[in-house]
Image: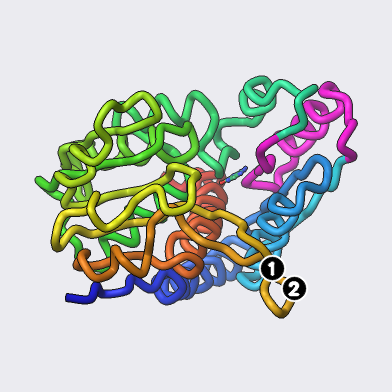
Amino acid sequence: MSARIINGQEVAQQIRHEIRQEAERLKSAYGISPGLVTIIVGNNPASVSYVTGKQKTAKDLGFYSVQEDCPEDIQEEKLLALIDRYNRDPKIHGILVQLPLPGHINETKVLYAIDPDKDVDGFHPVNLGRLMIGEALFYPCTPYGIQQLLIRSNIEIDGSEVVVVGRSNIVGKPVAMMLCQKAKGANATVTICHTGTKDLSYHTRRADILIVAAGRPKAITADMVKEGAVVIDVGVNRIGVTQEGKARLCGDVDFDAVKEKASAITPVPGGVGPMTITMLMLNTLNAAKRSLKLS
Ligand code: GUN
């Protein structure tokens, strides 16, 4: 059996179409455009590429978008002051500080500084706490994208065995927390595996849905996957450059071998990646709607 390839680009486009329509409605009914500021410190190539993609998508959707490029050696107080300026700017509904930050800046302090109502990344401890109790304002974008990809691909989550490989605050922990909520598109039995897990294959082979955010190419091989499982590959590993000079990417899953065993699988690129940016736009749209205090 060869797996169905889950096309993240297609699902993302469908959601972007819905976002564009809703943004146009907001504009004509209330005269506001969703506003997003992306803040980048330094010029790490991966971060520059992510932020460029976010800005381009925001503009394509007709959002008001601002990019702030800060020097690598910016003082922490200056960065905090910049965030505070946008916290108070009524045209801006979403603030995103691209991570990782240089070592001299306290990442936690920066994430705390963002107004939780404008935290479209969903990384503020208030929002992560709200997510845990099923009262989220914003879901972190990659976990939200994974959940939407599963739902819109008609994959049954309710009652399934989900195994997450990786325990980052950005992907592993929040996606696990989202999928175990008693809610639609969730209600799964979730296991989190990490570098301290003694027998990784024992767990991954039990998964109906295997979500891999390990940060290691080919961390998951075919023998680690159950026949018919759904495999979501969150890995973005840069393994050289293409003929066009773009970064050559591969995921955390041995795609060619695992696709012969899985029932559905996401490719890299073209799987989870396009969904992450799209969910950022959805969070920004929703932040703009919340700012109207309609209900
Ligand atoms: N670095 C890697 N992924 C992300 C993300 O989703 N948001 C931010 N702000 N930084 C990141």
Measured Cα–Cα span from mark 2 to mark 1: 6 Å
Q: Which residues are magenta?
A: 71-100
**Residue in the picture at 31% in, 66% down:** 257
**Residue in the picture at 46% in, 61% down:** 275
In screen coordinates, is 65 left or right of 211? Answer: right
Q: Amino acid at mark 1?
A: Val
For this rendering, which residue is in front, 148 or 253? Answer: 253
Q: Secondary structure at mark 1?
A: strand
* CB under 8 Å between discs 2 and 1: yes
Q: Is residue 14 above or below residue 96?
A: below
Q: Is residue 195 above or below residue 266?
A: above
For this rendering, which residue is in front, 65 or 251? Answer: 251
Q: Amino acid at mark 2?
A: Gly
Q: Is residue 294 above or below residue 34?
A: above
Q: Find disc 1 in the rendering and name its residue.
A: 241
Q: Find disc 2 in the rendering and name its residue.
A: 245
**In the rendered structure, does residue 97 fall within the stretch colored magenta?**
yes
The residue carrying pointer 1 sits among few (fewer than 14), some (14 to 19) or many (20 or more) residues within 10 Å by Cα, namely few
**Residue in the picture at 43% in, 38% down:** 137
Q: Secondary structure at mark 2?
A: loop
Q: Residue furthest left?
A: 159
Where residue 72 sits in the image (x, y, percent)?
86, 37
In screen coordinates, is 34 left or right of 215? Answer: right
